[in-house]
Amino acid sequence: MSFIFYAPLIMDWSGAKMSKSLYVKKGAYNDIPQEFINYHLLKKVRGIGSLDTILKIVETWFENPYMLFRNYTIYYFIKEFQKYE
């Protein structure tokens, strides 16, 4: 039996899919706090508790399934981090 896992699309400021390989190298995301682009930096800057914050954000999607089937900008996550931390 096969499974399909769905995850919302994370978009940048222009509404395009976040592209680490293309844009980060060219500095297009310089206006975004770098810890929201680099997982290791996220743990270093915001601590291991930042993973709990991500879990809380995702849990709200499962509690409200309509939230799972939409796209989010990186700014949504920045705002959510401010709410939980």
Image: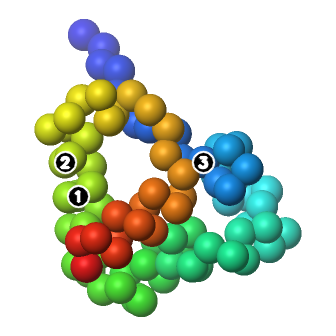
Outermost residue, top direction? 1
Q: CA distance from mark 1 to mark 2?
A: 6 Å
- Looking at the rendered image, the disc whose residue lies closer to the viewer, 3 or 1, is 3
- For the N terminus, the quadrant is top left
Furthest-right residue in this view: 26
Badge 1 vs badge 2, beta-carbon distance below 8 Å: yes
Q: Which residue is mark 1?
A: 55
Q: Give the SS element for disc 3.
A: strand
Q: Quadrant of the C terminus?
A: bottom left
Taking the image as shown, residue 23 lies to the left or right of residue 48, namely right
Name of the residue lying farthest toward the bottom: 45
Q: Residues within 10 Å of mark 1 (few under 14, many from 20)?
A: few
Q: Name which residue lies at 60% across and 48% down.
A: 11
Whole-number angstrom distance, CA of label 3 to CA of label 1: 19 Å
Q: Nearer the viewer, residue 45 or 84?
A: 84
What residue lies at 80% left-to-right and 73% top-to-bottom?
Answer: 27
Q: Which mark is residue 11?
A: 3
**Residue 21 x, y percent position in the rendering:** 73, 58
- Residue 10 visible? The answer is yes
Residue receiving disc 2: 59
Q: Residues within 10 Å of mark 3 (few under 14, many from 20)?
A: some
| Image vertical order of residue 30 relative to residue 14, above or below | below
Figure quadrant of residue 76: bottom left
SS for tag 2? Answer: helix
Q: What residue sits 30% from the left and 28% below the top?
A: 66
